[in-house]
Amino acid sequence: MSFVDVNHKGSPKAFLSYASEDRDLAEKIANYLVLKGVDAWWDQWEIKSGDSVRRKIEEGLGECTHFIVLLTQNSVVKPWVNAEIDAGFRRKVEENAKFIPLRHDLPVGRLSEFLRTMHSPEIKESSFEGGMKQLVHDIFGISRKPPLGPAPEVTALPDTGYSKAAMAIAKVFVEKSRDGMWGDPQITMSKLSDLTGLSRDDVIDGVDELNGMLEVKRDGTKDRTVFPDKSLFAKFDAYFMAWNPEVDALRLAADLTNDENFPSDPREISERYGWPPRRLNPAITFLDVEGLIKVSQSSGNRFSCVSDSVRKTSAMRRFVKSRS
């Protein structure tokens, strides 16, 4: 049987049921509850000379948000305590109060079948402060569960048809590349695991999934090096950078097709558009992948070089028209 979660306005009100033989401990518990913000009903405070004992108890039970019964060797055999347990249980069933059986020097085996179905915390003299602190936390709904931490970063990656592992790896290469060209950068498998938070097996699977856009240097070492093909940037820049290579490629193709004086030298194109090599190269690569231009890459050159002989092919014109 589980506790019923009840929302109450204001301070929680706890009715404390106990046997007269346990008065000193009950008083100690009641005082602690009050000092910690729980409005405890204890008969020695609530029932005054001339009051109807029955009515006062009924008032306390009727207003409580938490029914606490102090279960000891003395109280479990008291008819009056058991009558209050019946009333507390009724409030629990009607979802008006939580029922808290609180044990002291009483083994669980001495409890009734009904009371055994509920968690019954134990209050010990030797650890009174700790036990009562937890009781107050339970009354106020303060969870022992630690705060929920952030989900792994890979779960926030966009859905593209590729696995989250492949996207995480692509993101690393895209963000760390200086110019968006072949072999820029080169990263070991273990470093990819560190940068993505993926296990080594997930890194291997992700790299395999990006086969053709990533290559692995098989030099016989266990920690192999992975490096990108330039096509990776043409494919994934749109997800992680401030530009879209396909959109940039369309602009470049239109200018190459329509403007006879448009330069083919990437340095001049870069100056005209205000694009650094990191942005221009993936746009050029996109057209290369589409088979619309021919490019080359020379060592030490930060730009892909565009052949001037294919700027006005029919395929280039169809590309521009189909995306305009």
Image: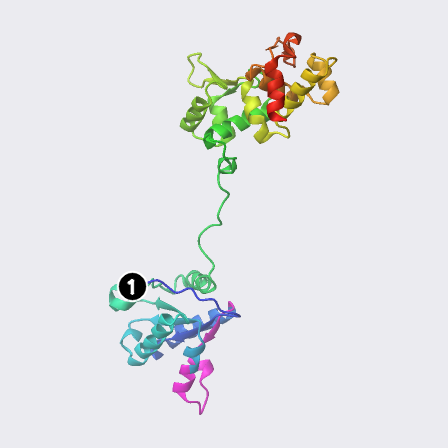
The verdict on residue 50 being magenta is: yes
Residue 219 percent location from the top left of the image: 44, 12
Q: Quadrant of the C terminus?
A: top right
Q: Is residue 155 left or right of residue 21?
A: right
Q: How is the image coloured?
A: rainbow
The verdict on residue 184 being magenta is: no
Q: Counting other residues with Cα less than 10 Å from the Cα at mark 1, is it few (<14), some (14-19), or many (20 or more)?
A: few
171 or 57, nearer to the observer? 171
User: What is the secondary structure assignment of the residue under circle 1?
Assistant: loop
Report the magenta residues as a range: 36-58
- Which residue is rendered at x = 50% and y = 27% of the image? 169
Residue 21 percent location from the top left of the image: 34, 78
User: According to the image, label 1 marks what residue?
Assistant: 117
Quarter-wise, where is residue 246 in the image? top right
Residue 26 percent location from the top left of the image: 40, 74
Q: Is residue 256 left or right of residue 95?
A: right
Residue 178 visible, this orientation: no
Residue 172 percent location from the top left of the image: 54, 27
Above or below, comparing residue 64 to residue 248 in the picture: below
Q: Quadrant of the N terminus?
A: bottom left
Residue at the extreme bottom = 50
291 or 89, nearer to the observer? 291
Q: Is residue 108 left or right of residue 270?
A: left
Residue 39 visible, this orientation: yes
Q: Amino acid at mark 1?
A: Thr
Count of marks placed on residues = 1
- Which residue is rendered at x = 58% and y = 19% of the image? 286
Above or below, comparing residue 243 to residue 302 in the picture: below
